[in-house]
Amino acid sequence: MKQIIIMKRQSLWLVLIASLVIGCSKLEQLPEATASADAVFGSDKGLELYANSFYQLLPSANNVHTADNMSDYGARRDAPPFLRGNAYSPSISDNTSASAYNLVALGPDWDWDWGQLRNVNYFLQKNTDPRVPEDVRRHYNGVARFFRAFFYFEKVKRYGDVPWIGKPLDVDAPELVAGRDSRTKVIDSIIADLDYATVNIKTVTDASRSLITKWVAYAFKARVCLFEGTFRKYHTNLNLAGSSAALLTLAATTAKKIMDESGFKLYEVAGTSLSYRRVFTNPAPVPEEVMLAALQDPALGILHAANWYMTSATTGVRFSFIRSFINTYLKIDGTPFTNTAGYETMEFKDEVKNRDKRLEQTIRMGPYKRLSGTTLVAAPPVFSYTFTGYMPIKWSLDDTYYDTRDLNNNAVSIFRYAEVLLNYAEAQAELGVLTDADWAKTIGALRKRAGITGGLTTKPATIDPYLQSKYFPGISDPVILEVRRERAIELTLEGFRFYDLIRWKRGDLMTMIWNGIYVPALDAQLDLNEDGIPDVVFYKVLPPAPRPASITYINVSATINGVPNSQRLANDTYGEVTWLTTITRTWAERNYYYPIPESDRTANPNLVQNPGW
């Protein structure tokens, strides 16, 4: 099986080819030719090996599973600098890469860096050697243009208007001091690149799920068109709403082509409720559903750190889901959980029962167990890690062996078929044309896999008041509301949420209170998984010794040693756990874009700064 990751590590050719152009972080830097361009561009193998260097633009496994650490549905050990007024600015944004867990954009090329673009453009300019058959050259040009589109989509999401550069630039090129091109020009150029890719990429199937195929290019096109179509619809200040419908239609038709022709489907194992989780824990990508993945290889030391990140009190940001989001998981019969009388004061052990099966495959709850050595042991939420009680497991493996460092060998999906279904459903819903048949093939199918029994074949006709009031007060269409609910739940911890809020113009959700489980009283011994062993006590006065070793004791006093306490109960002696209400998170209009680093604006004064920065 062809493995791009292995080829990257093993091939000296790749190192030599990449050195032609990689390492240029500014547009004006020229490559040093340390390998013969003639050898590279004069053979199929040379083109293939050069094209492998483009894969560095894809997010790593760690990029994906940590990307939602700045989202509305997660609490964390600190408030992100981006949400703390003057803690993030154009003059310091250059240095944010020092804190990998503060990044939002996927992939290594997350900031105002242009070296990878020159790599792609150089290839496209040089790939003209007639010794290579034209269809082969067009194939690799298609791969290159896919990656140029990928590069630019990350830039548009982050900065809005950016310079469109379609060729490698000389040191005196006027484009080096040109201003920013409009997002319409850049998006049109991205779509043109993807249209070329879908027509010319020859690879249709790839067993390893590590190569860009024709269907991956279609999936990316649907993603881009949905993003931009909804962005223009809801960001009315751009005066681009008139072009929204055409983009949404293109998103729908592109996704539908994948649904009708690609052969991908949702992964389901008969007789088990764990199909969803297996998509994220298998060492090899699940071929039915996963279209492209970040592969791991223990033999080469290529591993990721999901377990370490999701179990360690000292590594990462201690991401914990908030209760407001957990409330959006439906009951197993397909009705809203928040329609249940008394849900507000339900204890954790009760609120997680009879819910969408994805909940038990996303957080620690109920009978969840993990392997410790050779023994399966109960694994309730651990309050030395979680701030809220809703402790994630989606990408982690059920074995404590993997908890101590980057040891995870499970493949991490970058494109999967479930997203295609969601993109189709959302585009159709936003256009107002989603039918019952569409619903059944998309949202209904996803919910069926999740064990939900009701509402699978008919689109909703009534609004869930909790979902509308808490999340989307401006939306009165119940279908759009339910599609958004489904997207959040199905794709959680896959890196979509922040930019979903950006395109829907709901960034203010980033300031939601970080709330957790309901605690009925101080000093109550809470058995979170009902195994007869108490797990946590919230106190103001620590009970005297001896204390049960199984219990984590959490001080919820107003102050600790004279310092305001970050972990409290909403009503002082009872209520929802709250975390870090001592620090104010804010959202302003400027936060819909990142600032261009001042160092780059100094080099090119024609790069006008984003408003508010």
Image (tube, grey):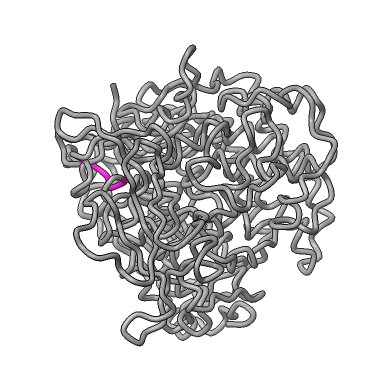
On the image, the x and y values in percent for residue 438 come to: 75, 26
Q: Is residue 165 above or below residue 291?
A: below
| Residue drawn at point x = 76 percent, y = 67 percent | 238
On the image, the x and y values in percent for residue 504 come to: 69, 56
Q: Is residue 399 above or below residue 73?
A: above
Asked whether the viewer can see residue 560, the reply is yes
Residue 370 among magenta residues: no
Quarter placement of the N terminus? top left
Residue 558 position by quadrant: bottom left
On the image, the x and y values in percent for residue 307 come to: 29, 45
Q: Is residue 64 left or right of residue 82?
A: left
Dominant SS type (magenta): loop
Farthest residue in the top direction? 270
Between residues 345 and 410, which one lies in front from this camera angle?
345
Residue 53 position by quadrant: top left
Quarter placement of the C terminus? bottom right
Between residues 97 and 314, which one lies in front from this camera angle?
314
On the image, the x and y values in percent for residue 518 come to: 52, 55
| Residue drawn at point x = 33 percent, y = 49 percent | 535
| Residue drawn at point x = 58 percent, y = 30 percent | 199
Q: How many marks?
A: 0
Q: Give the residues drawn in magenta, as a range.
A: 302-306
Q: Is residue 527 left or right of residue 543?
A: right
Q: Is residue 495 above or below residue 422?
A: below
